Image: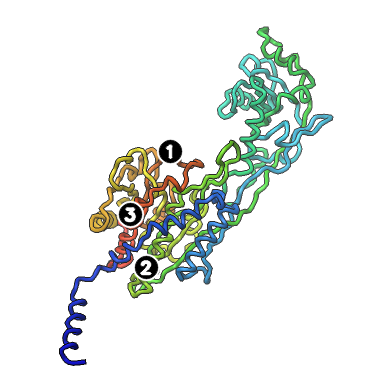
Amino acid sequence: MNSFVILILMWVISSFWSLPQEPPARKYGNKISSADLKANLSILASDAMEGRETGKRGQKMAAAFIRANFEELELDGPLDGDYYQTMDLYQRGPAETYVRTETTRYDNFTDIVYYGSDNSGGEVSVPLVFVGNATQVDFDQVDVKDKAVLLFSQSEWIAGNKAVALAKERGARMVFVCNVSDKDVYGVQLGRIKANATNSRLSLKYPTPIEDQRPGLFIVSPRIVDKLLGVTLDKLLEVSDDPKAKSIKKIKPVLISYKTSMTVKVIKSENVLGFLEGKDKKNELLIISSHYDHIGIKQSGTGDLINNGADDDGSGTVAVIELAKVFALAKKEGYGPRRSILFMTFTGEESGLLGSEFYTEHPVFPLGETVVELNIDMVGRRDALHQESAPYIYVIGADQLSSELNVISESVNKAHTNLIFDYTYNDQRHPERLYYRSDHWNFAKNNIPIIFYFDGIHEDYHKPSDEIEKIEFDLLTERTKCIFFMAWEIANREARIMPDIK
């Protein structure tokens, strides 16, 4: 090769290197892929995941899917190589509960259904007193103190029923309610109570048994009222509607027995964590989170019963996976973050922010070294207020603990994505109280600066209609990029972001 050719080659190479290079943040932010977001959400929000209810099969499958992504990205499992932070959750549920006459026992969810959560402390035998429509006049005719009462109700539901309140005010030990206006109502009531009783709220703490305190009530099918009181239903209705005084007391009390008991079920669930170690500031931590659980399958109704939660919070979860992918690629190519990043998807958010509460009570990394928590919960849709809006996102909490964080958030957005930042829900006194309603709250309680990214409350919130077909993937991509640039800045800036001194 002659010297002239060599000179030309050297000129070409030097010219290439003198061209302005794309900044790393911009390079990797542009790698966030709508196709990847859609592919992952197509799995996470599919019917196969059964609505991802905490503790159920679908949630376990979703956890395995997220873990597989973290493994493929070669993130570290920060729990001795494991990606799961496992916890015990507790759920109260009905145990042996029945009503018994001299001849017949009626078990719970047959012709009687118990509405309550207490233990009677064994079988209780008491006189059952009839109080008709349970008016003040009716109660004045009989002594109900320390007895059970049976009353007729015209309303479909018993919450706030004045007659029930009056019975307890008069000292009744147990209340039996029968709706006689519509015989089909009992089946509706039974279905609702059974669904609630067998899917009661989960708790991180073992519930303390309640022995014979603040007892609930029994709802009774009209077809067994005569078996309980030994008087036909027609006769009881006649007495109840008799305008003459003192008709109620003609119905003699009957001795009955009942038992109520509850059990506590232990449910295993898990947060899914993927860790990317930083460089020179690796002991400081940025957390990027979502919740991957949802509300499962509806217990009654027709049509589509699976709450797939494509937006809530499938969208946030696939955003976390996509952010993990891009940061992991950057590290592999020599542009790893200075601070460490924990990508974390929580269980139990829909049951009361349980997964994030468990993490903050049992942190894998010191909370004092956790610089910022970025929480992504519903970022794939538009709400009614922004149907014709330019790309936007609700930003919640950025200025609540750190004014510095808010300033950086604004400047990073203007430099890169220029989304409309809507601060409507940022007010802690807003009626929706969204500052307290997602997993960032458990970090904010510990004085860790947070940002909560949110798209608003739309018509499909907590309904089976929250489907992937309604996700705007271009908008989801832009929002994910916005969060990426903010995460990049937090993870790589010289000084850590600090909470304001108060």
* Residue occupying image coordinates x 48% and y 53%: 42
Q: How many residues crowd mark 1 within 10 Å: few (<14), some (14–19), many (20+)? A: few
Left or right of 393, for residue 346: right
CA gap, disc 2 and disc 3: 27 Å
Q: How many residues crowd mark 3 within 10 Å: few (<14), some (14–19), many (20+)? A: many
Front position among marks 2 and 1: 1
Q: Is residue 203 visible?
A: no
Secondary structure under the numbered disc 3 in the rendered image:
helix
Q: Badge 1 is on which residue?
A: 459
Secondary structure under the numbered disc 2 in the rendered image:
strand
| Tag shown at residue 284 | 2
Report the front residue among 26 and 167: 26
Report the front residue among 152 and 76: 76
Q: Earlier in the sequence, mark 2 or mark 1?
A: 2
Q: Pointers 2 and 1 in contact (CB under 8 A)?
A: no
Q: Pointers 2 and 3 in contact (CB under 8 A)?
A: no
Q: Position of residue 231 (x, y in %)?
A: 78, 18
Q: Badge 3 is on which residue?
A: 478
Left or right of 115, for residue 474: left
Q: Position of residue 223 (x, y in %)?
A: 74, 24
Q: Pointers 1 and 3 in contact (CB under 8 A)?
A: no
CA gap, disc 2 and disc 1: 40 Å
Vertical arrangement, residue 419 with respect to residue 489, above or below: above
Report the front residue among 291 and 463: 463
Secondary structure under the numbered disc 1 in the rendered image:
loop
* Residue occupying image coordinates x 33% and y 54%: 478
Quarter in which the C terminus is drawn: bottom left
Q: Position of residue 80 (x, y in %)?
A: 53, 71
Front position among marks 2 and 3: 3
Q: Earlier in the sequence, mark 1 or mark 3?
A: 1
Q: Residue furthest right?
A: 103
